Every structure is written in structure tokens, then in C-alpha cells.
Image (spheres, helix red, strand yellow):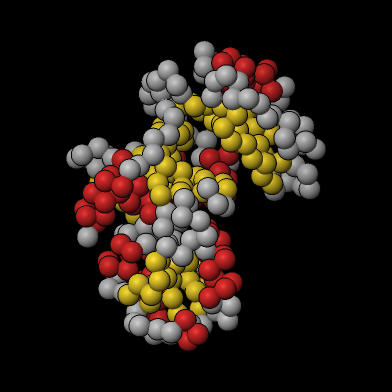
Amino acid sequence: MRVAFLGPAGTYTEEALRASSPASGVDEVAYPTVYEAVMAVQDGKAERAVVPIENSLEGGVAATLDALAGEADGVRIAAELIHPIHHCLIATRELALEEVTQVVSHPQATAQCSRFLREELPQAELVSATSTSEAVRRVRDSGEPSVALASRLAAELYDCRVLAAEVEDRSDNETRFVWLAPADERVDPGPRAKTSIVFWGFNDESPGAMAGPGSTRGESLPRRRGVSRRVRTKNLQRPDPLAERLERFRDVRVVRGALEVGEEHVVTQRHPPRPRLDLRQVDRARRQLR
């Protein structure tokens, strides 16, 4: 089974893939961006993909949500998992913090370490990379007094040094990852399934209109078609009344009626609830990558 993921080697996404994948028969395929990993399933280049979808500090991962709500209409969420995230400050050599001129990382990682960067590296320019591992590769090859924010594993893989560990703003930082599959593959999500809905055209002026007792997450994103045009994402589990209705149906027309929007304005998916990876699973994944 070919599984696309956000690469290169050593990303948190690859750790999540290794820690949650079947014991054998997985052909990992690295892609340079989240969008390309999602679209690999859409285009039939991969049978599965693993991508980040939400962080406990910074919220939804826009690239994943945008792809699932837009072009990747042939892709569904098949499973999800929670992965603890601990960032390191990484350089090619021992370096005093006051010497650092640039901090390179994925924007999510940079935001998750914002307090450390303000207090310890106020002089450094923040530079965006497509992934944390790519940031380490760029720092390794740059020859400049720059640093990356990434995992300790990435530092080991690319022969770099850890200047500081656990620099994230909160020690309980974690990211929800999803396994994606072709939409026409039906898998029984089990009795405690989570229902994920993406919809638009419903109550654009009231982002909280879909809040409810069984809502585990809700978000309002720009639709990129005019001011106040929004795309809503919502995760439902019982005892939400809408979740109870949707448990019995896969037909999008039922969702359309429940939300009072057009059929073409709804994407609905059901998948098993999230497990949290324990440290043993994460350590096993890291040993496999070394």
C-alpha cells in the first residue's frame, strides 16, 4: 500500500505514519507539501495519505482543510490519531543564540514556539519552510548562522546539533493527524464514529451557528469568494442530535436537508474516533527512522 506523507524524512507526519501504520506492506512516499500529499490520493498516485489537520496551540491546518473542502472531492478521512509534538532548536554547529540571524521552519512550528522566539531570538528573521525536516536540510546546507525548529530525530537524520529542546509554548502541545483514503472505499467506522462535515452557504454571518453539545470541534474559514463568504468545518459525536441523525445515513441529501444548504455545498465523512499515541509507539517509530 502506497502511503503519501509530508516529507522529507524525519517529519512529525512520518513519525505519526510509522507509529500508526500496519506492521508491514507500507510503501512510504514523501511529498514536499501537504496539498501534494492529499492530491496524491485524489489522483490515484497513492492509496492512503497521512497529513496534519489540527494543532492544540494553533488550530486547524489550513492546507489540509482547504484541500479536503476544495479539489480533493474524491478523498475521505479514514482514521485519525493524536501525536505529541516537542520542538528543538537545531543548528549545524554550536551557536550562541545572539549569533542567530534566521529561524527556519514550517509556519505551524514557528507559531507553536512564538514565546521562545520572542524572548530568546528577537533579532532573528523568521523564514518559512514546507516542513520541519525541510527546514533542517536548508539550515544544514546554508552555511549561515541560522537555526531550524524541528524534532530531535530530524537533527540526527541530517547530522545537526540540538541547541535547545522542548521550546514549544506548552509542554502538552499535540497535533491531530488523519489517514486519508479514496472516497469510494467504504470502511466501517465503528459504533463511536466521528462525523466530519464541511459546508457553506449556511448562515455566513454567524460562525458559531452550528455549535452543539456533541460538537468536538468547529471552525470557520474564508471561502476565498468574497468577504463574509465562509466555509465551515464541524466534528460531531453523540449526544449531538445532528450526529445521531447522520449516523444512519451516508446520503449527502440528508445532510443537505439538515443544514438547509444545497447538495453541492456539503462534504460529510465518518471515521473512527482518535487514539492518542503513547510514548512507546512514538519511540518505536523514531527507532525505525534512524
| Residue 212 position within the rendered picture, expressed as x and y whole percent measured from the top left | 66, 26
| Residue 189 position within the rendered picture, expressed as x and y whole percent measured from the top left | 41, 23
Q: Quadrant of residue 223?
A: top right
Note whether 245 is above or below 203 in the view shown. Answer: above
The answer to whether one can see residue 44 in this image is no
- Residue furthest to the left: 24
Note whether 119 is above or below 83 in the view shown. Answer: below
- Residue at image x 35%, y 83%? 94
Quadrant, the C terminus = bottom left
- Residue at image x 34%, y 82%? 93
- Viewer-nearest residue: 205 or 282: 282
The answer to whether one can see residue 277 in this image is yes
| Residue 127 position within the rendered picture, expressed as x and y whole percent measured from the top left | 53, 72
Q: Quadrant of residue 3?
A: top left
- Residue at image x 46%, y 55%? 171
**Left or right placement of residue 234 versus residue 210 in this view:** left
**Left or right placement of residue 199 versus residue 185 in this view:** right
Q: Quadrant of residue 144?
A: bottom left
- Residue at image x 60%, y 29%? 215
